Image: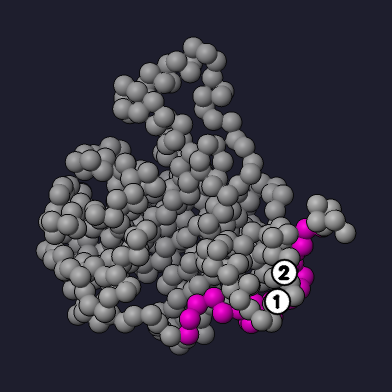
Amino acid sequence: VDEEQAPLLSFIGLGPELATNLEIISSEPVQRYRDHTADVIDLSWSHTNFLLTASVDKSVRLYHFSKTNCLHLFKHANLVASVDFHPLDDRYFISGGLDKKLRLWNITDGRVKDWAQAPEVITSTRFTPDGKYVVAGLLRGQVYLYEADGLKYFTQIACRNRSGKNRKGKKVTGISFLREVGGKSERSEEHHPSLAERLNETGRSVANLVATKVLGNPEALSTRRTDRMLVSTNDSRVRLYGLHDFCMIRKYKGHTNNSMQIRARVSESGLHIACGSESGHCFIWDVDPNKNRSKKSMINKQIQSTKEKTKSTDYFEASKASLPIVTDTLFFPTNTVRESFLTSKEMLPLSLGLDRIDDDFSSAAILTLDYDG
């Protein structure tokens, strides 16, 4: 058979037992750090492999995986709930916590560059993917957006139900982003017309004028409209918002998150969401459950499924501890999964045709963590 005519391969139906032969992560840690004197609540990795840790001991510490010691200590006035590296310049990071202060730190100087006072306790904070805004999730379900330059207030979103017991809002436990470039997700081949493509010539001129005068960047309008934000809250809901109008696109439910700091994660392809649960399960949703995708998902279809109105999810048991709480989940990157296939002796026959496998590798493997360690 000619290479051009070779059919696409798929692992669907070959059985989950194949995955047990893959070594995706090492059995022993690369480093152990024991500098904090209380629980570590949040972590952030930079693109140059530096690590920030936020702790109940009122501090943030800086590490590099190649070094055995803490590189710098950033003291705070109270508990630090969240920390995040700047996505484009790892000389800066943002932190927030119990003292309601959002701080932008300069690592080189070891000092606070800018700060802003939030109206409530800050429970989660992240930079937007372009680094232009800082997002702070608060104790009562509010999400505040600030301009990264100067931490000037920009806008806010209320992540809560309109009625019922949770109408006053619950703690924001996590913020993630799903970014699209040029009207499509970073790994999706489907094209969605941009706002400018839907406008006539006069409309495009007005849009460009607004983007230049108001946003300061003629490309800002088309860039910001493609970003989406995923917000996890303690009312057992995950909500997806568009950053072009800050309106809710979709709500995901099925898991249990009433008190823990559980955060939903997005796969590298932008097609799936995974989230832990206080029930001991890992829940998985399609970002768009109504969208017919050409590529198959490698998520094991033998796991249990539920479909009820706004609830459409796959889930599996991820903890058998005495207190079965899945505190975090993480999709393995595509390159990591492919590497594990290529280096596995048991998978050698199949890995020879890896370039012809038409599956979403970014949802092929998930790391879960539980309350039992």
Give residue 272's mark. Answer: none
Is residue 77 left or right of 126 when viewed as pictured?
Answer: left
* Residue 25 inside the magenta-drawn segment: yes
Position of the C terminus, as image quadrant, is bottom left
* Residue 9 inside the magenta-drawn segment: yes
Question: Where, by quadrant of the figure, is residue 77 drawn?
Answer: bottom left
Task: Pick whichever, 291 or 207, lies toward us.
Answer: 207
Q: Which residues are magenta?
A: 7-27
Mark 1 burial class by Cα count in 10 Å: few <14, some 14-19, many 20+: few
Q: Are marks 1 and 2 in contact (CB under 8 Å)?
A: yes
Position of the N terminus, as image quadrant, is bottom right
At 44% from the left and 70% from the top, the residue drawn is: 328
* x, y percent for residue 291: 66, 46
* Residue 135 visible to an observer of this rendering: no
Task: Pick whichever, 70 or 247, lies toward us.
Answer: 70
Is residue 355 left or right of 223 when viewed as pictured?
Answer: right
* x, y percent for residue 230: 45, 52
In terms of secondary structure, where does tag 1 sit?
Answer: helix
Which residue lies under the disc numbered 1? 348
Say what amino acid the circle numbered 1 marks: Leu
Say what amino acid the circle numbered 2 marks: Leu
In terms of secondary structure, where does tag 2 sit?
Answer: loop
Give residue 352's mark. Answer: 2
Mark 2 burial class by Cα count in 10 Å: few <14, some 14-19, many 20+: few
Task: Pick whichever, 130 or 350, lies toward us.
Answer: 350
